[in-house]
Image: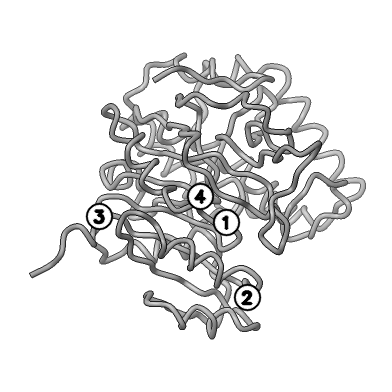
Amino acid sequence: MRNTRDEQVLVSLVTHNDEAFIERCLEAVLSQSVPVRVRIMDSASTDRTIEYARRFPISLTSRPDNIGYCRGHNANLRGESYRYALFLNADCFLEPDFVACLLSAVQVKRRLGMAGGKLLRMRRDGSWIRQAGLPVLDSTGIYFTPAQRHFDRGGGVVDRGQFVRCEQVFGITGAALLCTREFIDDVSVDGELFDEDFFAYREDADLAWRGRLKGWSAVYEPTARAGHFRRLQAQPRAEVDPLINYHSVKNRFLMRTKNIDLAVWWHCFPFMWFRDVGILGYIAARERSSMDALREVRRLRPRTLEKRRWIQAGRRTAPGEIAGWFAFRPVSFPL
């Protein structure tokens, strides 16, 4: 007979050369105060990630090619029984009651499909980064600006207790994201929770936007705490890996094509257009490597429009209800 308690929470990781983090990550996951099961999809690691991971009682699949964040997590879900899925980066170290706190938060009311906790910046060795003796925030949810950029709420700011309320936010960072099974089944498009055309980057923002259109909310729970090693720090665009810039540009336009409505379009005027012009001008002048991203957006347009038709046909949120979330300062609401 199956133990339904053990089927309640599935923890999904997609790894790629994570030997510096995977052992401490799995130790923290398997020390949670509630039962969890772990599935790892390893995408072409060339270090000792697989060797280290196999020391733990987990399910692991390895691929010879890097299939990306989105496809890896989607593969981990298929054929699994669970009530909740926690999508986790290997460079996140959870406190022992992290999952339990998120479960309590997401069960407060119906249509809460996503939950996330307070992520704090940490160094590679797992110690928290501090300023003036206080920890530095990494994320307390994500928010969108009218320029169609999304940011981690509180990212890089000293934690002075300014994010202590359990509240609704636009979405949750994909570094540590809990979703209900009902939410996953409802918002998945053609069997994909995360859009595999994205590969990686912006997929969490896209999921949050799609969830909002379908009438789901995201909850931030401050008692659920974890450390996160932020690999991509704020830095000049020219210093960022060209592959990251490629996916970032591509996914900006794919996400908008699928999700935007007229109310959001005009609410973001003219900031979204200014940002677009800046991006396109920079690509033309200094980042020719991202021209392929624009070509890929064009190639994917028929498929993206088909996804848009499915998303918009099933939306439960009235026009105009989402536009207010796009602001230059983070927006949140009490539960």
- In the rendered view, tell whether residue 47 sits above or below residue 323: below
Residue 208 percent location from the top left of the image: 47, 36
In the picture of the structure, the residue carrying the numbered disc 4 is 176
First of labels 4, 1 by sequence position: 1
Numbered circle sitting on residue 92: 1
Residue 295 percent location from the top left of the image: 68, 53
Numbered circle sitting on residue 8: 3
Q: CA distance from mark 4 to mark 3?
A: 17 Å
Which residue is found at the position 48% from the left and 67% from the top?
A: 27
Question: Depth check: 286 or 295 in front?
Answer: 286
Q: CA distance from mark 2 to mark 1?
A: 13 Å
Q: CA distance from mark 4 to mark 2?
A: 19 Å
Q: Residue flagged by tag 4: what amino acid is it?
A: Ala
Residues packed near mark 2 inside 10 Å, few (<14), some (14 to 19) or many (20 plus)? many
Residue 187 percent location from the top left of the image: 34, 42
- In the rendered view, tell whether residue 52 sits above or below residue 185: below
Q: Residue flagged by tag 2: what amino acid is it?
A: Glu
First of labels 4, 3 by sequence position: 3
The reply to whether dot 4 and dot 1 touch (C-beta < 8 Å) is: yes
First of labels 1, 3 by sequence position: 3
Q: Residue flagged by tag 1: what amino acid is it?
A: Cys
- In the rendered view, tell whether residue 146 sits above or below residue 174: above
